[in-house]
C-alpha cells in the first residue's frame, strides 16, 4: 500500500465496541440518580411555593386556603412537584408534600 491514512474497519469496530461498553456502564448509574434528582426538584418546588404563600399573605393579609387558590391568583403555574406529588398548604401557611401518590 502507498501509506494511506485513515481507519480500518477493525479499528472502527473496536472504537464502537468501547463506546458501547461505556454506555452500558453509564446508563444504570444515570437511572439510579433520577429519583434523587426528582426529590431535590420537589424540595426546591416546595421552597418556591412557600415563598409565594408569603407573598400572597403580604398582598391579602391572609394565607391561601389551597394551592389552587395560589394558582388561580397567578402566584404559581402548577400545583405538583416534578415527580408528581401534590403540595398542600396548612391553615398556618406551611407548605408540605402529599406523598400518597
Image (cartoon, grey):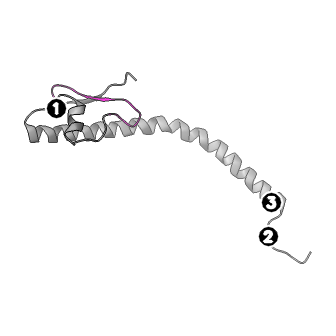
Task: Report whether 21 appears left or right of 4.
Answer: left
Q: Earlier in the sequence, mark 2 or mark 3?
A: 2
Residue 38 point in image, percent of width and height: 42, 37
Residue contact at pointers 2 and 3, CB within 8 angstroms: no
Residue 48 point in image, percent of width and height: 26, 41
Q: Residues within 10 Å of mark 1 (few under 14, many from 20)?
A: many
Q: Which residue is mark 2?
A: 6
Q: Element type at marker 3?
A: helix
Q: Element type at marker 2?
A: loop
Give the CA distance from mark 2 to mark 1: 68 Å
Q: Residue at x 24, y 32 (%)?
A: 68
Q: Is residue 83 magenta?
A: yes
Q: Residue at x 36, y 25 (%)?
A: 99
| Region in magenta | 80-92
Task: Report whether 71 appears left or right of 60.
Answer: right
Q: Which residue is mark 3?
A: 11
Q: Which residue is mark 1?
A: 64
Residue contact at pointers 2 and 1, CB within 8 angstroms: no
Residue contact at pointers 1 and 3, CB within 8 angstroms: no
Q: Quadrant of residue 12?
A: bottom right
Amino acid at each position: 500500500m502507498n501509506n494511506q491514512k485513515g481507519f480500518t474497519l477493525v479499528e472502527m469496530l473496536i472504537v464502537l465496541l468501547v463506546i458501547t461498553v461505556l454506555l452500558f456502564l453509564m446508563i444504570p448509574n444515570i437511572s439510579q440518580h433520577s429519583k434523587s434528582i426528582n426529590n431535590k426538584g420537589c424540595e426546591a418546588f416546595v421552597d418556591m411555593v412557600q415563598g409565594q404563600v408569603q407573598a400572597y399573605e403580604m398582598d391579602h393579609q391572609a394565607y391561601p386556603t389551597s394551592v389552587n387558590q395560589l394558582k388561580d391568583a397567578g402566584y404559581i403555574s402548577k400545583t405538583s412537584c416534578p415527580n408528581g406529588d401534590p403540595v398542600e398548604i396548612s391553615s398556618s401557611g406551611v407548605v408540605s408534600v402529599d406523598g400518597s401518590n
